[in-house]
Amino acid sequence: MYGSSFAFNVVPVGGFLRTFSHKLSELMYSLIDNVPSIPQQYEVTADRVMVDCVPLAGGLGDDVLFPGVLKTAGGSDCAVLVRRYLGTYAAAITRHEVTLLLRVAHKNVLGVVGLVDVTPHESYVLLEHGQSNGNGSNLQTLATNLRARLGSAAFCRQAVQWTLDVAEGLAHMHSNNVLHLNVHASSIIVCDGTAKVNALGVAQRLSLLRIASPEALQLSMNTDVFGVGCVLCELLTGSSPWGKCTDTALLHPHAGPDVMDLSWADTSLPDIKTLVKQLLHIDPSHRGTITAAMLELQKVLDTVIRVAESPQPTLSITPCSLSPGWLDTVNAQSSLLEALLCLIGCPLPADREDLRVHHADLNEPRLRAWYQYAADTITKFFSFPVGSQQ
């Protein structure tokens, strides 16, 4: 779990399993001692729910959700996401989870729709799946699909906005004295364009604190701030903050993740790297609060928007001095592409600071892609009249 810090003392395997099994039994009993009652409008009968057999792409552990449909009498069916719970205490656990979800309801926290007891040993929690026919997507999967399609500047803007959504959801949870403790891109669902924290599993994680070692009890709101840094890092680099570090290496003393050498989607905004480095600081006290993180994310977002919307230079239009048919003499393959590639390495004109962002993006793959796009577009144009200079 990127965002949590649970630690276990090393003990002989047999003894560990016996101890852990006993402690886990105590945990289960703690969850069923005081089973909360659920408002009647959230109790759903099993015959009203259809669940897909294929889970939503990108989920891990507690974040594995199945698309489903909730049938409503006299109205249109409602798309939902379904979390399945199996076992003797499934009904009790789901009621604790739903109670917590209702407590932290917010536009940036994945909302609960209902609870279903399928059998005495199987229960479902139903979650929102977007207003537009179930358009919810796992953030990690969605980012992977959009990273190349949007371009670096547009994707960077969207990534910062999604991370700000996540921070707002966590801030609301913290205001209700609830920690998430497992924040990363796979624990976020995007519905109708808004990123929402999936808080399922939080009730069980908080119960685990009863059997945690003393050092693990140092978890705090700063643990979730680290999670915000994880989300932003995953979105902008496509990698976890720890890069290629092995699980074994992470168990040994280290100085925290080094994100500066990762491959970033947009290198023109150094403030983002600095912010991510702070959010992932090894010392929790140096990460800042979730509120401070929200303010910094908003500043970065404002900068990204300002750069993207800065006025572009206008070209003066004068009468064409070329004779009709001049374009026929131009061999695009041997001159246009070569001219484009010559831009690589050219210094930025001293009086054109407005082009700095574009200049930083100049590289051979990008220029070849632009050339191919232009060539493909031109071949689709309608024919101009003979002799026209259009």
Image: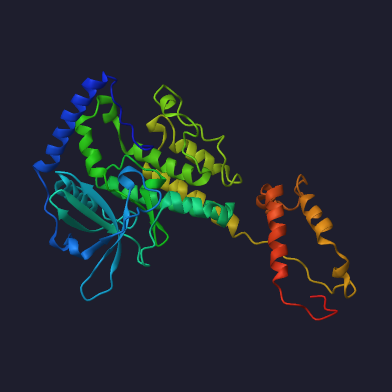
Q: Where in the figure is residue 297, as x and y percent of width and height?
A: 46, 48
Residue 69 x/y as whole percent: 28, 64
Q: In which quarter of the image is residue 56?
A: bottom left
What residue is at 77 percent from the left and 50 percent from the top? Answer: 341
150 up-or-down from 276: above or below? below
Task: Please identify the residue farthest to the left as the structure is shown.
Answer: 33
Left/right placement of residue 321 relative to residue 214 reads: right
Whether residue 260 sits left or right of residue 66 in the image: it is: right
Q: In this view, does 194 lie above or below 182?
A: below
Residue 362: in sight, yes or no?
no
Residue 193 visible:
yes
Residue 146, given in percent of the width and then of the height, sits at 52, 55
* Label tally: 0
Q: Extreme bottom residue here? A: 385
Coloration mode: rainbow
Using residue 346 as the reference point, say whether residue 240 is left or right of it: left
Q: In which quarter of the image is the C terminus?
A: bottom right
Tell me the quarter of the picture where residue 330 sits: bottom right
Q: How far from the left and from the top, in percent, is residue 86?
A: 20, 46
Q: Nearer the viewer, residue 134 or 111?
A: 134
| Residue extending furthest toward the front | 53
Quadrant of the snapshot with the N terminus:
top left
Closer to us: 72 or 278: 72
Say if 374 sits above or below 382 in the image: above
